[in-house]
């Protein structure tokens, strides 16, 4: 593959993703620094696919870190292009326009090392469909930041789908925090493939800690668009579910510290080298919370959550075991063996519907989706090879 440019999205530049845990600091900045390093070392333009910043109103530090990277690219004469995501969107004065170097791609088309690339800022449903009709013919790649039905299926409201797209056969998209590729047909019936590099650092504990950016290129023999995921060095993440006393005793007797030490890497910045641990434990286990946080101490960032017995569809989603009349009414509307019924029933019987919805969303995002870095891409894109920094 002949490399053409680097694509990443969803940097969400901010001190930390968890406002309640200020000690978890600098993850987004470190990932951005690595991406800039790579572009400069390989002399490859960078295209930013939206949500570069976490929010519309920013404090000084995220802007300073953003400008630091952009200035390094400018000093090395390496181009930077961008679109806006929904998090930072400002139709009048995009944040990146305050720096002289990056080029805004919205409603424009550019030649980037021999491929024609067009882009749109995030747009609401309806507006984005109309925008797709304005994509010029003979455009190779479209840059977007939308909620695509092709990624989300029927989970929640989406902005658009690949059958709305005209002319292009490759879409690079931000917003979706999972590394993923999908293939469908565009509005003209031609095969179109969409790539999502995912976020560049964990923004939620439901996300995979393995993060990537993409090097986009061409295969010389066929001239087809190809890609290579490049893995970022990120904070390590450990996840445990403690359901019994033996597991709790083992973790607290030294297994937790052993696992933490196995994750440490002295070449990482000190603030990134402290792992993040999530532990879900049975609330019936005596003193579990106190024992777990004492066992971890200051060696890692820890998040503990007491859990009840999980919702079991075999016990609670039939009429005979319905907990309330709503479940019976639901069964009159939706087949009881359907995924829609199971999701709705889980929400109805949950002690906290909001938390249950987060659980179901996490399952959809991480349990059923394949990692593009581990799975061959479409025939058009070739087979991805994972590169590490």
Image: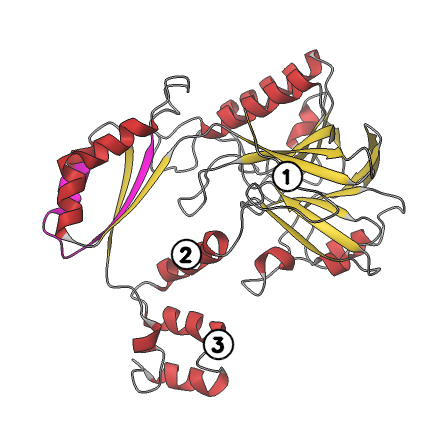
Image location of residue 147, percent across then percent down: 62, 53
Q: Which residue is mark 2?
A: 358
Q: Is residue 58 left or right of residue 129?
A: left
Q: Which class describes the residues within 10 Å of circle 3: few (<14), some (14-19), or many (20+)?
A: few
Q: Callout 1: helix, strand or loop?
A: loop
Q: Disc number at residue 185?
A: none
Q: Disc number at residue 384?
A: 1
Does residue 286 show up magenta in the picture?
yes
Image location of residue 173, percent across then percent down: 66, 45
Image location of residue 128, percent across then percent down: 74, 53
In the rendered view, tell whether residue 320 sits above or below residue 108: below
Label 2 close to label 3 by CB (< 8 Å): no
Residue 41, image quadrant: top right
The one nearer the camera, 388 or 70, is 388
The image quadrant where one finds the C terminus is: top right
Residue at the outermost left position? 286
Residue at (64% x, 55% y) in the render? 148
Label 3 close to label 1 by CB (< 8 Å): no
Q: Which residue is mark 3?
A: 338
In the rendered view, tell whether residue 307 sits above or below residue 226: below
Image location of residue 49, percent across then percent down: 66, 38
Label 1 close to label 2 by CB (< 8 Å): no
The one nearer the camera, 284 or 170, is 170
Q: Callout 2: helix, strand or loop?
A: helix
Give the number of the mark in front: 1 or 2: 1
Write the start and end of the magenta stretch as one range. 275-293
């Amino acid at each position: 593959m002949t490399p053409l440019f680097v694509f990443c999205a969803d940097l969400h530049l901010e001190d930390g993703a968890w406002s309640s845990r200020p000690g978890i600091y600098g993850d987004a900045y470190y990932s951005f620094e690595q991406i800039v390093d790579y572009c400069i070392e390989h002399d490859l333009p960078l295209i930013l696919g939206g949500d570069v910043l976490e929010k519309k109103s920013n404090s000084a530090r995220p802007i300073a870190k953003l400008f630091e990277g952009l200035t390094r690219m400018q000093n090395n004469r390496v181009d930077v292009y961008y679109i806006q995501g929904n998090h930072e969107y400002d139709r009048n004065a995009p944040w990146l326009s305050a720096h002289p170097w990056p080029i805004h791609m919205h409603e424009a088309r550019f030649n980037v090392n021999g491929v024609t690339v067009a882009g749109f800022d995030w747009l609401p449903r309806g507006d984005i469909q109309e925008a797709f009709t304005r994509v010029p013919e003979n455009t190779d790649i479209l840059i977007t930041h939308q909620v695509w039905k092709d990624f989300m299926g029927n989970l929640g409201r989406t902005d658009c789908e690949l059958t709305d797209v005209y002319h292009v056969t490759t879409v690079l998209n931000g917003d979706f925090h999972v590394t993923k590729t999908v293939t469908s047909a565009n509005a003209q019936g031609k095969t179109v493939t969409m790539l999502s590099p995912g976020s560049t650092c964990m923004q939620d504990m439901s996300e995979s800690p393995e993060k990537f950016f993409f090097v986009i290129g061409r295969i010389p023999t066929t001239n087809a668009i190809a890609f290579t995921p490049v893995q970022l060095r990120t904070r390590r993440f450990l996840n445990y579910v403690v359901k019994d006393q033996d597991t709790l005793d083992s973790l607290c007797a030294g297994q937790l510290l052993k696992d933490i030490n196995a994750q440490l890497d002295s070449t990482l910045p000190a603030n990134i080298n402290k792992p993040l641990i999530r532990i879900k434990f049975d609330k019936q286990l005596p003193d579990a919370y106190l024992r777990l946080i004492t066992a971890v101490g200051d060696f890692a960032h820890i998040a503990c959550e007491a859990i009840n017995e999980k919702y079991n569809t075999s016990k609670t989603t039939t009429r005979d075991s319905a907990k309330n009349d709503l479940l019976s009414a639901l069964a009159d509307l939706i087949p009881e063996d359907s995924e829609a019924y199971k999701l709705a029933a889980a929400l109805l019987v949950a002690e906290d519907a909001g938390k249950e919805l987060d659980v179901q969303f996490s399952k959809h995002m991480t349990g059923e989706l394949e990692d593009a870095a581990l799975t061959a891409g479409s025939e058009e894109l070739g087979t991805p090879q994972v590169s590490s920094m």
